[in-house]
Image (cartoon, rainbow, N blue to C red):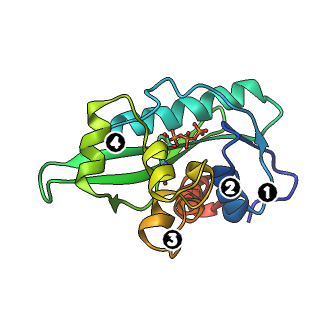
Amino acid sequence: MLAKEFIIALGTHNQAKRAAVVLASGIEPICHAVPSGVADQPLSENETIIGAINRAKHVLAAEPQADIGLGLEGGLTYDETHTQQWYLFSVCAAWDGKQLFVGKGLYFPIPNPIGEKLQQGGIELRHIIDELSSTVGSNHKDGAYGLFTEGRITRSDVFRDAVIAALTPFQSSFYK
Ligand SMILES: O=P(O)(O)OP(=O)(O)OP(=O)(O)OC[C@H]1O[C@@H](n2cnc3c(O)ncnc32)[C@H](O)[C@@H]1O
């Protein structure tokens, strides 16, 4: 476990992401919205990872008193090779000014018509999930994962695992 005095800067005010960091670390992060430098709706694995890394680096620069910057980014990717299926996944990048690690959360199939609609542009996943779940701000709540699994997995759960993965090399003596 990280020491309580360890300061985490998180590059967003998103509540699902903030909750994920608390679940993963037991620490309340300093939230500071920073640009991801990628599209509002990333549509490839590479773009999503770059967005997470940009956020981690930008937030540590903006909050230099922090020990580590975390960037959390959600994105979609199309699996051409095996399943011809769109997937939603969540990435955490962790940057302490010297070392960078990335944790990837669950890969989760989403209905292909949703992926195709997003690919056409002009709309983000949260708009579609808001409409399907008759809510506003689904991306701050249980998200697409919560809707499709009837609450068995939430957006915070998925990001929690990604945060644990990205933080572990900074915590565990096995990586020293
Ligand atoms: O405020 P920020 O940190 O930018 O959080 P975000 O939720 O708006 O943005 P992300 O970059 O993480 O996600 C890219 C887009 O995909 C949407 N999205 C990703 N995962 C989602 C989920 O589980 N449920 C609903 N929308 C989701 C999200 O709302 C954005 O429109």
Residue that numbered label 3 is attached to? 153
Question: Looking at the image, can residue 74 be seen?
Answer: no
Closer mark to the observer between disc 3 and disc 1: 3
Name the kind of residue labelled 2 in the image.
Answer: Val
Nearest-to-viewer mark from 3 and 2:
3
Residue 52 at x, y = what percent? 51, 38
Q: Which mark is residue 21?
A: 2
Q: Residues within 10 Å of mark 3 (few under 14, many from 20)?
A: some
Q: Which residue is mark 4?
A: 45
Local SS, label 4: helix
- Marks 1 and 2 sit apart, C-alpha to C-alpha, by 7 Å
Look at 58% across and 38% down and name the residue there: 99
State how far apart marks 3 and 1 are (Cα).
Answer: 22 Å
Seen at 55% across and 52% down, the residue is 166
Give residue 21's position: percent from left, percent from top: 68, 55
N-term-proximal mark, 1 vs 2: 2
Pointer 1 or 4: first along the chain: 1
